[in-house]
Image: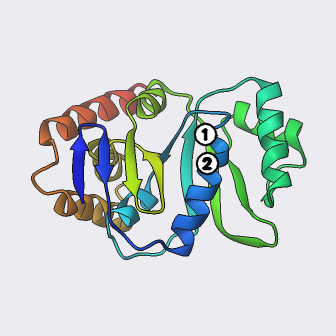
Amino acid sequence: MEFLDEKTLKIDRVETILDKFVVEFTKMLEKYAKYTIISGYVAILLGRSRATEDVDIFIEKIEKEKFFILFDNLRKNGYNCFNAQGPDDAFNHLLDNLALRFSRKNKPIPNIEIKFAKTDFDKETLENRIKIVMPFGNIFTSEIERQIAFKRFVLKSDKDLEDAEHMEKALKGNINNKKIENYRKILENYYASI
């Protein structure tokens, strides 16, 4: 893997079932909303060998009518939202800062968990996303340094700490430690204020 520029990371990997699911879903999603993938799937993309049942995504806040079209299009293309009764209920979930879960019909795993980017940190994560270029498709994820900081200093579970360590090792020499430290300070200040 190599950075083609500051915002583009090329990864040569064999497509997995999870990758196929994510690329297909995000191709539809990006027609309606800017998105960024966060959390464990980012470490998996960088070669971490671990399972995940869901892929977490922030999307920009979009108008209700646009969301309804997205929701309808996802249904027509074989996706099911299994924690909302319909588009109105789903949109209200997002407004209430709750996640929506989408999967292929009759296949609850894997699934995509979508939330509106609500906090300033969430919105910055969305704005500062990077493009991941793979042989089978492109997706957008949060900056790796931001992911490392969030996993190491906020989530802190064994799995998250291992994800952070793996990402640093996978991109050794391409990680900006000053950025990680800066994100740590931002996160500490944010969580101290709530």
Percent across and percent down for residue 192 are 37, 30
The disc labelled 2 sits on which kind of residue?
Answer: Lys
Q: Which mark is residue 27?
A: 2
Percent across and percent down for residue 64 are 80, 26
Percent across and percent down for residue 110 are 63, 69
Q: Is residue 8 left or right of residue 94?
A: left
The disc labelled 1 sits on which kind of residue?
Answer: Glu
Which of 26 and 143 lies nearest the eye of the viewer? Answer: 26
* Distance from Cα at disc 1 to Cα at disc 2: 6 Å
Contact (Cβ within 8 Å) of mark 1 with mark 2: yes
Asked which quadrant contains residue 169, the reply is: bottom left
Residue 16 vertical placement versus 169 (above, below): below
Disc 1: which residue: 30
Which of 147 and 30 lies nearest the eye of the viewer? Answer: 30
Q: Is residue 52 left or right of residue 89?
A: left
As helix, strand or loop, the secondary structure at mark 1 comes to: loop
